[in-house]
Image: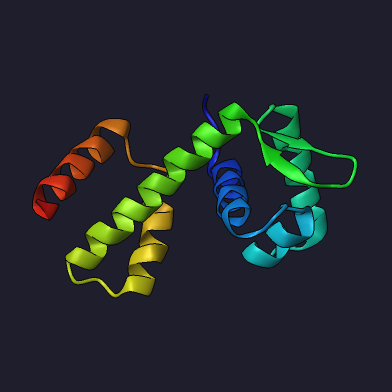
């Protein structure tokens, strides 16, 4: 289930938008990420070919099971890493920006260790 950083960002964005909008369209993704619609259309075509999303005739975008798994993994990493950096005294905006970079390259082992540590700190 290997995906590149760009695909992971798109999947995470679709997940986040699906929590606040009744339906997600390419234009919503373009607006959220500040990208041009043709770039998003190409990315959606690639995600569809990899069976990470489905697109209805009306242009509504839905995550498939594999797309949702990837999106939820990246979103969990983003949220936890942001929280961890804020706990260390990093400004929230900077923490979120840094977490967005780290979430794609951190190993599962390292992330699980951070997750375990943060949960122990919260007790």
- Between 97 and 120, the one nearer to me in the picture: 120
Where is residue 68 drawn, in percent x and y?
A: 56, 36
Residue occupying image coordinates x 10% and y 46%: 120
How is the structure coloured here?
A: rainbow
| Residue at far top of view | 1
Q: In this view, does 14 lie to the left or right of 120?
A: right
Residue occupying image coordinates x 41% and y 64%: 97
| Residue at far right of view | 57
Where is residue 93 drawn, in percent x and y?
A: 38, 73
The image quarter containing residue 110 is top left
Q: Is residue 33 above or below residue 115?
A: below
- Between 22 and 49, the one nearer to me in the picture: 22
Q: Is residue 23 above or below residue 7?
A: below
The image quarter containing residue 88 is bottom left
Residue occupying image coordinates x 27% and y 60%: 83
Q: How many marks?
A: 0
| Residue at far front of view | 22
Q: Can residue 103 be seen here?
A: no
Q: Is residue 16 left or right of residue 120?
A: right
Q: Is residue 67 left or right of residue 95?
A: right
Where is residue 15 drawn, in percent x and y?
A: 57, 48
Q: Is residue 5 left or right of residue 21?
A: left
Residue occupying image coordinates x 60% and y 42%: 7
Where is residue 20 drawn, in percent x and y?
A: 60, 60
Q: Can residue 3 be seen here?
A: yes
């Amino acid at each position: 289930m290997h995906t590149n950083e760009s695909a992971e960002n798109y999947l995470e964005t679709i997940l986040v938008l699906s929590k606040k909008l009744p339906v997600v369209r390419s234009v919503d993704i373009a607006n959220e990420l500040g990208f041009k619609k043709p770039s998003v259309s190409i990315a959606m075509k690639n995600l569809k070919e990899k069976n990470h999303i489905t697109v209805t005739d009306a242009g509504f975008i839905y995550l498939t099971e594999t797309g949702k798994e990837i999106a939820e993994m990246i979103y969990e990493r983003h949220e936890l890493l942001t929280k961890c950096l804020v706990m260390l005294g990093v400004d929230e905006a900077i923490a979120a920006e840094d977490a967005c970079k780290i979430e794609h390259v951190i190993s599962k082992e390292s992330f699980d260790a951070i997750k375990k540590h943060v949960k122990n700190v919260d007790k």
